[in-house]
Amino acid sequence: MPEPSTAAGAPENGTGATSPRSLAEALRARDDAALSALLHSRPDLLNPVPGDVTQLATRAGTRASVVRALERLDRFTLQTAEALAVAPDPCPYPVLEGLLSGGEDERARAALPRALDTLRDQALVWGDEDRLRLVRTARELLAPSPQRPSPTGLGPTVAEATAGMSPTRVQEIVAAAGLPGTHDPVSAVTALTALFTDPERMSALLDEAPAEAHQVLGRLVWGPPYGEVTPNPAPPVRWLRDRGLLLPATARTVVLPREVALHLRGGLAHRDTSPVAPPVPAHREHRPQLVDANAAGQALAALATVEELVKSWEHTGPPVLRAGGLSVRDLKRAAAGLDTTEASAAFWIELAYAAGLLASDGEADERYAPTPAFDDWRELPPAERWSVLAAAWLPATRTAGLVGEQDAKGRTLSALGPELDRSAAPEVRRRVLELLADLPEGASADTEAVLARLAWERPVRTASDLRARLAGWALTEAEVLGVTGRGALSGPGRALLEHRDPAPLLAPLLPEPVDHVLLQADLTAVAPGPLRRPLGDTLAVLADVESKGGATVYRFTPGSVRRALDAGHAAADLHAFLKEHSRTPVPQPLAYLIDDVARRHGHLRVGAASSYVRCDDDAMLGEILADKRSAGLGLRRLAPTVLAARAEPTALLEGLRAMGYAPAAESGTGDVLVARADAHRTPARSAPVPVPDGPPVPDATLLGAAVRAIRAGDLAATAVRKDPGPAAGVPGELPRTSAAETLATVQAAALTGSAVWIGYVNADGAASQRVIAPVRVEGGFVTGYDHTADEVRTYALHRVTGVAELADDHL
Amino acid sequence: MNGPLIVQSDKTLLLEVDHELAGAARRAIAPFAELERAPEHIHTYRITPLGLWNARAAGHDAEQVVDALVEYSRYPVPHALLVDVAETMARYGRLTLSKHPVHGLVLTSTDRPVLEEILRSKKITPLVGARLDPDTVAVHPSERGQIKQTLLKLGWPAEDLAGYVDGEAHAIDLAEDGWALRPYQQQAVEGFWHGGSGVVVLPCGAGKTLVGAGAMAKAKATTLILVTNTVSARQWKHELVKRTSLTEEEIGEYSGTRKEIRPVTIATYQVLTTKRKGVYPHLELFDSRDWGLIVYDEVHLLPAPVFKFTADLQARRRLGLTATLVREDGRESDVFSLIGPKRFDAPWKEIEAQGYIAPADCVEVRVNLTESERLAYATAETEEKYRFCATTATKRKVTEALVRKHKGEQTLVIGQYIDQLDELGEHLDAPVIKGETSNAQREKLFGAFREGEISVLVVSKVANFSIDLPEATVAIQVSGTFGSRQEEAQRLGRVLRPKADGHEARFYSVVARDTIDQDFAAHRQRFLAEQGYAYRIMDADELLAND
């Protein structure tokens, strides 16, 4: 929406040549640094790059851009903007200061210049100190209207509230208020306004009010300023209404005029002005070393958890759901595997995903699996591995905390699935950590204080508490990841926040990898620290892991030793391996166990054969083996009287017959089989189901809906117009009227509550005809009940091709 | 950051024994962590809710626990674990059972939501009476044990401050003529008395009977002693007469054969749990006198019905004695809630180091079955398999060779199957003691063994418990109750009494190779190894070749 004052550049009541007359002019006067600061804080203005300052000013005044800019203001700056929206336009600085400080609040007075500077920087306010002007769109957004109450709780001004009132009524009010009568309604309203803004006369007037009237005022003073009244109200209300202290808003409601409310409030625009950001004090202080140690402990646990998680998906990872993401069952399984809750499992999974350690394999039967980056990651020293995780976590927009919740359409959000990105997440996360970083080293903050501070910095204008929840998650995640320890930012966490590499700080806090284990007689091996990788991997084959943490406890069992032998290690290798890596002598029972398992290992041999040849005469079997023609059968002598063959029994029979032998087939129990062709059958099948002719009979709901749609379409097409203008002549064609005429007609219809027939072209260029009953016309949009669609809809006026009234008998 | 302790994420603590701070660390963590395994280099402790509550009951707070962990830990302790410790410990003591001057037994809470939570439980509702005020609810005095058991299951263990009845006074003193309670026994008695009720954990041979006697001397009241069997009952009586001011006449035996009720009465679990026509006829024993103290010997064997009776005895002091809190049936929590928290614990090896029990050399002898035996084993029914491999003839030969090897030493041959024992007795020319052997005969044979008149004794599992045979230096185990760990401990305990000449005891297990016998043996020996008794494995062929 264009800013008329910008485009017109109309001269204001001359206040000197230096005073800017429009936002464009004010922007033009700024230096390049200020302009680039503006573009930096409102990047949407750059898209596309404006052609000139006028265009920039125009775009800075568009509704979408202003809304976005307002959402990024802190509470006091927003309150300043709100105060400007209820102040006279333009507003001198002292008036604004009065609205915010009530003349008494020193802190508000002190904070105001900064807030005003912010608003100016954001191009939301322009003009000199004595002529401050809020950008018109912002004013429209923030000023109170019956539809949208202002956060200030103030109502319309006397002038606004009396706009539609009969002059006689205004005269009566003026007289009742004890003012000299005047026949000119404008000067009457001015006189009334002057009375209400004069503290002394106002106090005198209110002193006469009955006590109950004060109660009524007390109820309305901090808003909402509207009150319902009966047609014949109680005396106190009548007293107030007669004097204009309450003005009628609609037939059944009255409103407290802004001037009266301000007088009662002592001039304050807000009940609670919060000029100062709520402090985030140190909640509990720990020794920084302790914090770092604690955080390092968590960091170590985090590394182990991520590695365990991703490794567990190495062989058969969980399948990817058709809609993307991980099924609830697989999440549960992962949580059970990690011995943690589902929420925390979701966090680890998303973290590994954000760090690029796991992803979908993209196969036809799509599954999640570790990425090649995971292998590189595992090769890094622990501190650097942590850096990778932390660096992936800090800027991530994916939000694990949402997993398990439902989206707007009632679908459950799954881990690794779509719809988990929240663009505010990185900003909130960083801000939370910055608040912790502002505290002395080793101090933790109270969560409530952090949340209060965040709420002040970005007073949430929407109902959702997403930012608070994001902040809560950020604190928990920082703790489990080891960015914080005992709630305080750790050294490595601070480095991460300051864009330095945390690894050198973390490395000395993490245990050094060890290259030895302690072997014990109860057949366990204890690695008193993280093991160097090749050693750890071999040991993991040779023994079962029993306990994890700073150290690892392995247990040797016959099964685990056999696994090592199966993996190709010989008993002698294992003895040598243990001897080399053990700090303690190898206990006799362990050595015995290895030998005992090795003794039996491979005693039984298993192989695959498709068929066999059995013959009591080993000479004949020797003959067959020697025959070159048997080469293709894959024969091998297992025992003097048995040959195993790779060929299928039938092929073997054929082959042997071709060689001139007369073999007989044998059954599983050794009987001779008699060959007989089997009759062919299909697998189990069910009989065909009868297919009826034509579509199924529709049910009552469907029928009802269809009839309603037909009737509504009918109504739009055949509506008899009151005034069939030349443009709307042919039935079925879109009505055509000029823009001014359209606006006037829908506004009139909104006032009378009658329905109109409109032609409408939607964003895709498709034209339609609709019958609507306009309710509200504002901001270039008409909102009304659409009889065609049977619901309340909003249409852009510039897309309405034309409008025609309906004949009364149609609705 | 170079402590002796490593805190694992599964709440086990690994203690490096050879570290210079190991002793200090052990003392710091012993109050709240259970020693799970004590092999030669690294001991494993486990932090369990019961252990933490034991510590709370002993007056330790979460801060001390966290400090101990943080101070001695080699690596950073995960924050989550510390939080968990603090939260678990905070659950103990939120509820207390106490005596109200007007309403009798009451359950009080310092945390109202907890009280609300537990009162909502269906299991608690029948146990409590009227709500006296927002934080207090009356409890039926008869349900004192039941409610403690149930609250523990709900995760809110109650502290029992309701006190005890003094019971009928009876003068009992220790007769310390030429002997004295050992320091650890003294500590155990003090620990128990201070705590009111609870369990004392001491290894076999460490003199648990004397701890019982010490407790009785403290209580100076009529005492009911529950023991596993008659032989054990006689031994208790013998020991009490010798060590205290009690005389034969003051001590009664309540068993299958005799039903004496005297100021000090020793009853067997067997007779208490005898059921006739659906009732326990001997239960009145508990009410027959105003007992001031009840002693449970071998608490880990306490049969389930005794738990039930014990629940009704919460107003009397209870002392549990055992070598291990491990119960094969996993009812450790019932021991905690009904008898009481652990009041004293000394690791086996520590007492051995002090010279109160003898060191032992444990050897597993692996016997190769003959081919025909292997075939027979392979075809045996599943339920017969163990019996078959545990009683093979080859084992007998090996056992004979072992007895020959230790000729002249006092040797016990212990087994499970009577025919095997009879056969062994015959071949070894040694008397056999089994279930059907009369008590008089048993006493006589044990006496002869103690005097050295006979040097080899073949015993069935009747000898698992509480038979004092201090002279035995060699024990040969030929078969056992499958993989029972506590049986292994009891049997080893037979040879652990300190020897006059400081001689090392020997404990042999004869095991059939490649059979289920070997698997069971592995399970049993793991327990020994975890107690710090390293064992060697030798081949029977080697033994027979040397023979």
Image (cartoon, coloured by chain):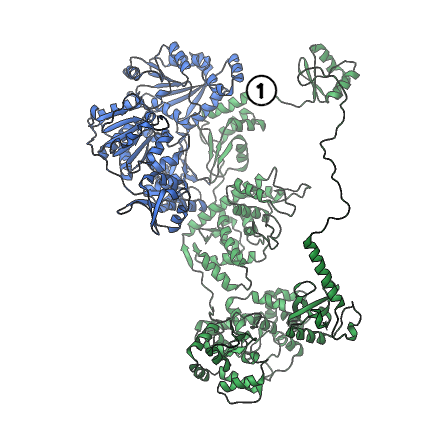
Chain colours: A green, B blue
Secondary structure, mark 1, is loop
Q: Chain of mark 1?
A: A
Above or below, A181 against B470 in this view is below
Asked if residue B139 lies left or right of residue A617, the reply is left
Above or below, A89 against B371 in this view is below
Where residue B24 sits, quadrant-wise, is top left
Give percent across and percent down for residue B526.
43, 27
Depth check: give the residue in front, A283 or A411: A411
Above or below, B152 against A436 in this view is above
- The quadrant in which the N terminus of chain B is found is top left
Residue type at mark 1: give it: His
Depth check: give the residue in front, B109 or B219: B109
Is residue A140 shown to the viewer in this render?
yes
- Report the number of discs: 1
Where residue A345 sits, quadrant-wise, is top right
Give percent across and percent down for residue B520.
46, 24
Where residue B152 sits, quadrant-wise, is top left
Give percent across and percent down for residue B250.
21, 26
Depth check: give the residue in front, A77 or B223: B223
Give percent across and percent down for residue B524.
43, 25
Is residue B17 shown to the viewer in this render?
no
Asked if residue A691 lies left or right of residue A599, the reply is right
Q: Which residue is mark 1?
A: A603
Name which residue lies at 48% across and 50% down. Answer: A479
- The quadrant in which the C terminus of chain B is found is top left
Disc 1 crowd rating (10 Å Cα; few below 14, some 14-19, many 20+) is: few
Above or below, B109 against B37 in this view is below
Asked if residue B218 lies left or right of residue A777, the reply is left
Depth check: give the residue in front, B342 or A390: B342
